[in-house]
Amino acid sequence: MTRKRVSSTSGSTSSTTRRTSSTRVPGAPAKPPVVHRRTPTVEFKPFILLLLQEAGGEREADLLYDELPERMSEQMRPGDHETGPTGELRWRTAARKARKELADEGFVQAPQPGVLELTDRGRALPPVFDV
């Protein structure tokens, strides 16, 4: 589908292609669900909260990250153990992003470098789950 665009200053026209949204045809098979090669960042959040809860609300970040792969063994995917462009394992990058999101949401903080702590809001959460 093509539409013409008129420039208000010169009066010239140019044509551009407009994308149309794909519409599912009734009776057509549904698209298969997206299969991720790596564990989505959001799946790390409850485990980070759980490990902090189990540690009494505060824990050294490296120790927490070292325990994540074992605790998340059923959630981890093969791509998580690949090395990213920075040389860091992809699961560790995702875990750090999840920690940052939890901090942005007000659940955790870093009272000093290398230490993670639940905030008052984080401490008010019910136990995440029993793993």
Image (spheres, rainbow, N blue to C red):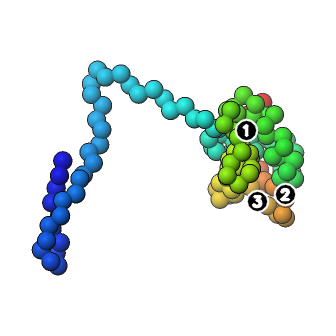
Mark 2 or 1, nearer chain start = 1
**Residue under pointer 2:** 115
Q: Residue at x 17, y 72 (%)?
A: 7
Give the class, few, some or many, for how many residues have Cα within 10 Å of label 3's Cα (few <14, many ≥20): some
**Which quadrant of the figure contains the C terminus?**
top right
- Tag count: 3
* Kind of residue indicated by mark 2: Val
Residue 111 figure quarter: bottom right
Give the class, few, some or many, for how many residues have Cα within 10 Å of label 2's Cα (few <14, many ≥20): some
Q: Residue 33 at x, y = what percent?
A: 48, 29
Mark 3 or 2, nearer chain start = 3
Please name which of the two marks, 3 or 2, marks the residue nearer to the observer.
Answer: 2
* Kind of residue indicated by mark 3: Gln
* Kind of residue indicated by mark 1: His
Is 12 on the left-hand or right-hand side of 124?
A: left
**Residue under pointer 3:** 109
Q: Residue 115 at x, y = what percent?
A: 84, 57
Give the class, few, some or many, for how many residues have Cα within 10 Å of label 1's Cα (few <14, many ≥20): some
Q: Nearer the viewer, residue 2 or 93?
A: 2
Q: Nearer the viewer, residue 93 or 84?
A: 84
